[in-house]
Amino acid sequence: MRNFKLTSKRMLSVEPSITLMITSQALDMKNAGEDVIILSAGEPDYITPEYIRKEAINAINNGFTHYTQTAGIPQLRKAIVQKLKQDNNLDYDISDIIVSTGAKQSIYNVVESTIDSGDEVIIPSPYWVSYPEMVKLSDGKPVIIKTEKNKFMLSAEELERNITERTKIVLINSPNNPTGVVYDEKTLKELSEVIVKHNLLCISDEIYEKVTYNGVKHISIASLGEDIKERTIVVNGFSKAYAMTGWRIGYAAGPKEIIQQCIKLQGHSTSCPSSIGQAAALAAISSNSPEVEEMHNTFNKRRIYLKEYLDKIDSISYVEPLGAFYYFIKVDNFYGKNGINDSVSFAKYLLEKANIAVTPGKAFGNDKYIRISYAISTKDIERAIMKFDYIIKDLSE
Ligand SMILES: Cc1ncc(COP(=O)(O)O)c(C=O)c1O
């Protein structure tokens, strides 16, 4: 009989999500009636603002329920062009834009459309959990560069040191998940010079653009000159800024040649993103709502509240997040105690002893840390602090 394997070698090379493992254990506990505080979610606790929901309902009632162009409706792509000009000082044509089923699909489209077998993609660590797996799925090679010593920012020197004949793409994510670090203009400028000098591409994941604090402004690397813009694909979306994770709308803007390939790939895999999601996204991007601003202000209040608490604990450390809604906390001082020896066992310990779900740093490529999200209610943050306090005292004895 022919040697027949049920699954492909390619899929077997891809890691399952550690994030989902802990969340799934937490949900099992919740379903069994336990009071679990979920600090591991990667999404706003708010529901989508009313003005956006209304437009989606109108779209359904008006029969806007058919396939659209694969790249998205022209009105939404036009609004994205205007947004990129207004917010980021970037000039694009509507044909340079593709709207996808979330920023996740946009990134995957770009990776799949640009790399050949064995091409290297430079990914600063800690990284968003899906980047290396997307590269592997496209038969590329993820090249991970640690950034902990440089306040979690990739430096131009480190980038240059890791470039080889096979390097094709550098992936930048600012504001960053999981660290909350926002890259400054000087660092971005230096990185752009190296990228241009070596004729590389850059994917700039800007999904947390709107979620910044202390007056820090997000800068798109693509806006730092025509030569870097020509080789950058800007990825953004609606999930985090407008509490629209379930609508699944994101987009990419970049060189026509690449966007055309992305449209081809999307056309053969998923076709257009949801028509109703696109109507909602058009409403979101077309006005500045006080509801959205209020949500971002609340994130900031929670961020400050947590900071005051975390600053009192000597045995942990973190780099102050100025974007996104996470703290990435160094907890390796507790390793070696009570059966804890890495970030996964620490997360399990917190879940089992204190009913708190956090994300192990291992999922982001750094096993000394855990990530907690403050996109949960202030009441739950207060409760989590009390429980966390108890655990820290217990482990410090
Ligand atoms: C850094 C980063 N990029 C992209 C995404 C994907 O966002 P979307 O919901 O638009 O697919 C996420 C979601 O968690 C993220 O954290």
Image: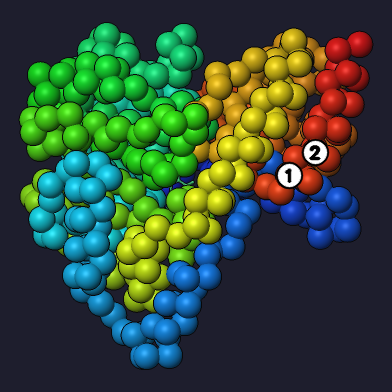
Side (left or right) of 20 relative to 393? left
> Are there few (<14), some (14-19), or many (20+) residues within 10 Å of tag 1?
some
Q: Quadrant of residue 352?
A: top right
Side (left or right) of 332 relative to 327? right
Nearest the viewer among 160 and 306 is: 306
Tell me the residue at 36%/25% (across/down). Answer: 183
Q: Could you give the CA–CA distance between mark 1 and mark 2, rounded to whole angstroms?
A: 6 Å
Side (left or right) of 178 relative to 205? right
* Label 1 element class: helix
Contact between labelled residues 2 and 1, with CB atoms less than 8 Å apart? yes
Q: Name the residue tied to disc 1.
A: 378
User: In x, y percent, where is residue 354?
Assistant: 86, 36
Count the marks: how many?
Answer: 2
Nearest the viewer among 320 and 368 is: 320
Tell me the residue at 34%/40% (across/down). Answer: 205
Look at label 2 and name its amino acid.
Glu
Tell me the residue at 33%/67% (across/down). Answer: 282
Q: In the image, is residue 228 above or below residue 157?
A: below
Tell me the residue at 15%/19% (across/down). Answer: 193
User: In x, y percent, where is residue 39?
Assistant: 69, 41
* Label 2 element class: helix
Q: Name the residue tied to disc 2.
A: 382
Q: Quadrant of the C terminus?
A: top right
